[in-house]
Amino acid sequence: AGSLDVSHPFCYLRQFVASDATVDNASGDGGANDDDLDPTIQQQIETLNNITTHALTSSTILYRTLLLRATAQTLLNNWDQLTTITSGDIDRAAISKTELPSTSQRATINAKSIQNVFEAYAHNSPQDWVQSWWKLIDADKDGLIDQEEMNNCVDLSIEPVHLALKDVFDMTLEVCPVRTIGLGGEEEARKKNAWFLGVDAEDEDAEIPTNIPPVKLSWRNRRKELKQQKILTKTFQATIARHFRDQAEAPHRLRCIYAWAEKAHQDNKLDSVLVDASEDWGSGAASAVMGRKRYVELEPKISYSEFREVQKKTFPHLDRIGEEIITSFKEDLWLLQGSKRQNKELKRDGLLFLLAISVVDLGIWFV
């Protein structure tokens, strides 16, 4: 706990985001010339830019790699779901007298579609992630999927981001301490926030320094560090679990998208038919009832363009999946800090109240 691995790009994440004070200073000194700066300060700024630029590039590549691994894990975890024949497909097969597999599972999945999923997560945006899963789920390749498959498509698009961000979070805690005491003490950390300065600024290929000695924490600070890591980990896991489900209300928004989309399939109307269950079209649910008919309601399918047209207005969170999770985590941390501050004030007020009561009781007793 509290160790610092300067060879890992994630230990520089704090330098990628400008604080409010940094933004204010930059806006206030916008008219100043860089030549007016002290040479030492200018050298430190150039060194900081060189190192953080290299670290940012490395972090981006590593995050994309973790996304690819998470995508493979998502495919493995949801393989049965991807190959399962939905009830809508079974009903349509009964109408068209199409034979379906006896195991209610598709034997294969298009390899090109799987490759497109990996390419989307390696190079493209969240919009392309959803579209790649859409094409993978569309087994008959007509560009249309039903509502159940649409919901699965969105869930599958989000799951790799959840897994990858968990890995990023765990790695970040491993390579950089949560508390500034792990950077060499509170005062030293304040005076030298950019603790990795020291590389030659004139060297354009400045590498991340590896000669920074680790700070050995006392047992008390080590215990505090582990406690903070545990709190952050628990908070982040809760954020991932509930953000899209509860805060963004993804199930409700998806229902609205399907209901409001102008679906060309079946003229956007419910198709009601009677299926002859005695037809031996397959060994599915229909063949279980012999000599009878069953009533089937077929909901219209939706295309990606129809989905996208409504999704941009109704569910824009899907275009910034990672940003949504990180922003929600930041807000959860603010709530956590606010509750701690409130508890401290409540404890202080309670102690002051008890002290006042004790003084009054002592005064009455002496009188």
Image (cartoon, rainbow, N blue to C red):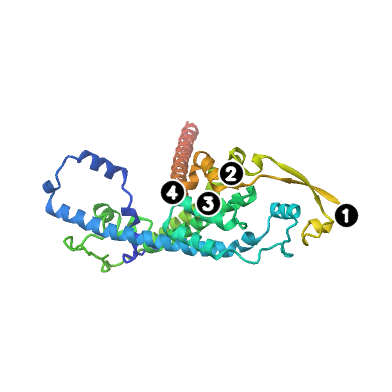
Q: Are marks 1 and 4 in contact (CB under 8 Å)?
A: no
The one nearer the camera, 293 or 353, is 293
Is the residue under label 4 in contact with that under label 3 (CB below 8 Å)?
A: no
Please provide percent x and percent y for residue 269.
68, 39
- Residue at figure coordinates x 50%, y 38% from the top left: 313
Coordinates of residue 61 in the picture (x, y in percent): 38, 62
Mark 1 and mark 4 lie on one chain; the one further toward the N terminus is: 1
Front in this rendered view, residue 7 or 360: 7
Q: Quickly name the residue at label 2.
A: 254
Q: Residues within 10 Å of mark 2 (few under 14, many from 20)?
A: many
Q: CA distance from mark 3 to mark 4?
A: 16 Å
- At 34% from the left and 62% from the top, the residue drawn is 58
Residue designated by label 1: 291
Looking at the rendered structure, the secondary structure element under dot 3 is: helix
Q: Is residue 176 visible?
A: no
C-alpha separation, residue under disc 1 versus residue under disc 3: 52 Å
Mark 3 or mark 4, earlier in chain: 3
Residue type indicated by callout 3: Ala
